[in-house]
């Protein structure tokens, strides 16, 4: 299944002057290992793959001497395969399980840059933020791999031409033909259920049914919980799990700002702040920070104490919440509050995949704009609606106060302009 991140890997490989060992970050089961193996098989003469979680012996090679020549010698012996400089892609998987291996990347960068090394880790973010973790700052390059965005989902399900037509309509700012608009909305609704995890998409393609997908999603959720127990102390893992389990409940509120008291009576940032950071570093949740002013640069106006938490994958949120698939697939307008939350989560996921940090704006208790993005010098407000009913005062208040060059309303409506607001269909967020 085609991934946009493949081009990032190719760009990294084809720039030997600045190339350093690569770290591919991302939540568990977003497809990091598969992507790296496919990259190696496509662009290299051979691949040398090592997993530090499943083969503990590999980690022992880094316990004493981590000079590249010695490490390569041991790796070749264990694999029974020669590693050729410039011709073999060396993959270190789950590298967060071996601190010394991560440290060794510095020496490969300095002493043996001819070896091409790409590393993946499901909990690299968590590991890097541990105390005393020796991270090779300035000696590695990093990319984030997210779940499939909606365009990649369309590619995977054989709707390449539909994705192309959506991009053309976005570029021309003209409505998509009605038949294609209906088809795209139907695919979007299926994406809300299936999500962007490769295993979920693969199961759907294999069976042609949405029913078996939920079993895959629950296994992924169970793996997340297992990681909490494995990579955190018992007391910390209990708090991390409590925060994780509260995400659907937090989003079900009309005011979706994260509230610690929902996790536990008397809960506070002092008690649960580090747990939320753990989930954020692991890529399991997406953190959307409140901003106090719609001015550039957006980041400096963020209120660190106020935020929303979204699931890293909308399909996993659908599975975890238990919302009826019939409600999501229904062609009729639905007033269910949680459907609005799913829609927001979907947009957050697409924006993150496009590289936008997540922010939202509020004006006291009177107005709230779901997302605010910065494009160059421009600050752009984005309002999200799950259906075609789009009346809201909040976006108008933001426009009156800050006069942005563009305002966007994401909804089930087709492309167009309404009261000087650009109407962006839900299925076209990947175009931003």
Image (cartoon, rainbow, N blue to C red):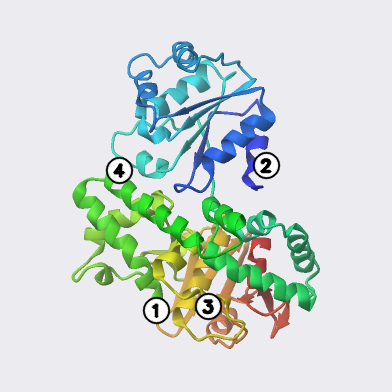
* Secondary-structure class at tag 2: helix
> Is 372 on the left-hand or right-hand side of 8?
left
Residue located farthest toward the front when viewing the structure as drawn: 207
Mark 1 residue element: loop
Q: Nearer the viewer, mark 3 or mark 4?
A: 3
Say which label, 2 or 4, has the lower sequence index. 2
Determine which residue is flagged by label 3.
326
Q: Earlier in the sequence, mark 1 or mark 3?
A: 1
At x 31%, y 71%, the residue is 259
In 3D space, how far apart are the residues under numbered discs 1 and 3 (Cα atoms)?
25 Å
Q: Position of residue 257 (x, y in %)?
A: 38, 72
Residue 181, quarter of picture: bottom right
Closer to the camera, 148 or 260?
148
Disc marking residue 255: 1
Of the two numbered discs 2 and 1 in the rendering, the one whose residue sits closer to the viewer: 2
Callout 2–callout 4 Cβ contact below 8 Å = no
Displayed quadrant of residue 250 = bottom left
Q: Secondary structure at mark 3?
A: helix
Measure the alpha-carbon separation of dots 2 and 4. 32 Å
Nearest-to-viewer mark from 3 and 2: 3
Provide the residue designation for mark 4: 231
Q: Quadrant of the C terminus?
A: bottom right
* Mark 3 vs mark 2, CA separation in Å: 37 Å
Task: Mark 1 and mark 4 in contact? Answer it, CB < 8 Å.
Answer: no
Q: Indicate the position of residue 53 as horizontal and vertical percent values.
A: 38, 33
Residue 45 drawn at (x, y percent) = 67, 22
Residue at 70% x, 84% y is 418
Describe residue 418's horizontal placement relative to residue 207 as left or right. Answer: right
Mark nearest the camera among 2 and 4 is 4
Disc 3 and disc 4: Cα gap in Å? 37 Å
Which sits earlier in the primary sequence, circle 3 or circle 2? 2
The local secondary structure at tag 4 comes to helix
């Amino acid at each position: 299944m085609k991934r946009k991140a493949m081009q990032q890997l190719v760009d990294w490989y084809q720039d030997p002057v600045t190339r350093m060992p690569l770290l591919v970050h991302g939540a568990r089961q977003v497809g990091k290992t598969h992507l790296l193996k496919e990259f190696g098989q496509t662009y290299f003469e051979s691949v040398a793959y090592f997993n530090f979680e499943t083969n503990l012996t590999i980690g022992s090679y880094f316990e004493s001497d981590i000079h590249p020549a010695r490490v390569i010698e041991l790796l070749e012996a264990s694999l029974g395969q020669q590693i050729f400089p410039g011709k073999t892609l060396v993959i270190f998987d789950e590298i967060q399980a071996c601190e010394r291996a991560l440290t060794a990347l510095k020496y490969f960068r300095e002493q043996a840059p001819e070896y091409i090394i790409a590393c993946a880790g499901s909990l690299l973010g968590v590991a890097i933020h541990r105390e005393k973790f020796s991270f090779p700052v300035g000696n590695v390059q990093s990319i984030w791999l997210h779940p499939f965005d909606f365009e990649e989902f369309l590619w995977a399900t054989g709707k390449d031409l539909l994705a192309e037509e959506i991009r053309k309509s976005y570029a021309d700012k003209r409505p998509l033909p009605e038949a294609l608009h209906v088809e795209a909305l139907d695919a979007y609704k299926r994406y809300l259920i299936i999500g962007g995890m490769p295993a979920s998409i693969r199961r759907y393609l294999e069976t042609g049914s949405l029913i078996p997908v939920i079993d895959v999603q629950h296994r992924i959720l169970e793996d997340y919980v297992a990681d909490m127990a494995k990579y955190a102390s018992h007391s910390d893992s209990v708090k991390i799990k409590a925060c994780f389990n509260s995400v659907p409940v937090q989003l079900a509120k009309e005011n979706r700002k994260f509230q610690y008291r929902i996790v536990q009576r008397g809960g506070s940032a002092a008690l649960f702040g580090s747990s939320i950071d753990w989930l954020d570093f692991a890529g399991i949740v997406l953190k959307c920070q409140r901003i106090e002013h719609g001015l550039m640069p957006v980041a400096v106006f963020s209120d660190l104490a106020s935020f929303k938490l979204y699931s890293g994958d909308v399909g996993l949120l659908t599975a975890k919440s238990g919302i009826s698939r019939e409600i999501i697939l229904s062609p009729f307008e639905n007033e269910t509050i949680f459907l609005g939350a799913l829609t927001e989560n979907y947009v957050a996921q697409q924006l993150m995949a496009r590289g936008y940090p997540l922010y939202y704006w509020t004006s006291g208790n009177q107005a709230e704009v779901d997302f605010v993005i910065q494009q160059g010098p421009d600050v752009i407000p984005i309002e999200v609606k799950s259906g075609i009913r789009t009346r809201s005062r909040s976006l108008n208040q933001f426009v009156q106060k800050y006069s942005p060059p563009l305002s966007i309303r994401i909804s089930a409506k087709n492309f167009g302009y309404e009261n000087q607001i650009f109407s962006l269909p839900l299925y076209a967020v990947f175009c931003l």
